[in-house]
Image: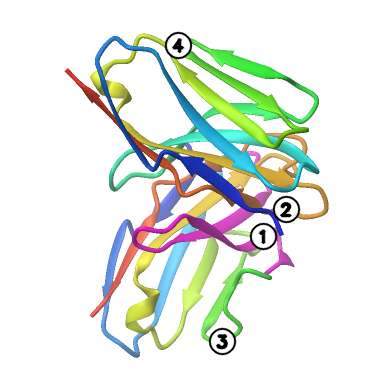
């Protein structure tokens, strides 16, 4: 059974700093891994999708990496801004079924 | 191109009543998924549907919960005889194809409160 862990559960960082969010998963037989952002009381916004054959994906100030063999992914946010404050979720899609398994998220606060 | 639309956004029910949550997928998407987010917990898969078919309902409670995605109209998640433990945010997501081919796009969620 796939388990996804995100550490830390909460993170506070001064504005302008670069930061890394971590995601680990126990079953490496995955199609892909997706990073989402969730604002309080809102839905999920897809940030980056990494296919199992890829090592990383970039979008603007965001860079996500995937090391499938070790069961790890990182989300790197450059030059953080107060608007980046949100909960960041990673989710994996496993072979053999159509369900995403989510981590419990990292609640990020950027301090102005 | 409108995103995934869910309604109602907020729903209050008393114990024993029925809750119906609706989801219209993105245009061109024929795969619909429902997830539940309990307070202070992560999102959990409930059910995966394609038009007129339930493909995987392994995450859905066996009693009181049902889902459909008819040929015409939105997908419906129905909860009968609601209990306080059903209070949660229910998210619908859609995709163009199966998960191995593309991204999943989520709606804003329907927040159910059971009094």
Res. B48 mark: 1
Instruction: Tell me whether circle 1 and circle 2 mark residues in contact (CB < 8 Å).
Output: yes
CA distance separating discs 2 and 4? 30 Å
Q: Report which residue position mark 3 lands on.
A: B63
Same subunit: marks 1 and 4: no
In the rendered image, residue B34 lying in the magenta stretch gets the answer: yes
Decide which of tag 1 and tag 3 comes sooner along the chain.
1
* Residues packed near mark 2 inside 10 Å, few (<14), some (14 to 19) or many (20 plus): some
At 24% from the left and 21% from the top, the residue drawn is A82
In the rendered image, residue B50 lying in the magenta stretch gets the answer: yes
Q: Nearer the viewer, mark 2 or mark 4?
A: 4
* Residue A77 spot, x, y in % from top left: 43, 17
Quadrant of residue A42 within the rendered picture: top left
Q: Nearer the viewer, mark 4 or mark 3?
A: 4
Name the residue nearer the viewer: B17 or A90: A90
At 38% from the left and 83% from the top, the residue drawn is B82
Quadrant of residue A14 within the rendered picture: top left
CA distance separating discs 4 and 3? 45 Å
Mark 3 falls within which chain? B
* Residue A90 spot, x, y in % from top left: 54, 39
At 63% from the left and 22% from the top, the residue drawn is A65
Quadrant of residue B85 within the rendered picture: bottom left
Instruction: Tell me whether circle 4 and circle 3 mark residues in contact (CB < 8 Å).
Output: no
């Amino acid at each position: 059974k796939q388990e996804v862990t995100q550490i830390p559960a909460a993170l506070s960082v001064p504005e302008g700093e670069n930061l890394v969010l971590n995601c680990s998963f126990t079953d490496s037989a995955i199609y892909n891994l997706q990073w989402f952002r969730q604002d309080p009381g809102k839905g999920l916004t897809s940030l980056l999708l990494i296919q199992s054959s890829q090592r990383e994906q970039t979008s603007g100030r965001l860079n996500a990496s995937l090391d499938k063999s070790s069961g790890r992914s990182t989300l790197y946010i450059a030059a953080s801004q107060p608007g980046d404050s949100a909960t960041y979720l990673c989710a994996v899609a496993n072979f053999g079924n159509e369900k995403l398994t989510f981590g419990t998220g990292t609640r990020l606060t950027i301090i102005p | 191109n409108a995103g995934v639309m869910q309604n109602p956004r907020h729903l209050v029910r008393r114990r024993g009543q029925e809750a119906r949550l609706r989801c219209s997928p993105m245009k061109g998407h024929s795969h619909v998924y429902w997830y539940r987010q309990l307070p202070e917990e992560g999102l959990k898969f409930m059910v995966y549907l394609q038009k007129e078919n339930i493909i995987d309902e392994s995450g859905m409670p066996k009693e009181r919960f049902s889902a459909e995605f008819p040929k015409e109209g939105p997908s419906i998640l129905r909860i009968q005889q609601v209990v306080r433990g059903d209070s949660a945010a229910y998210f619908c997501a859609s995709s163009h194809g199966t998960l191995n081919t593309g991204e999943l796009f989520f709606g804003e969620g329907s927040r159910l409160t059971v009094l």
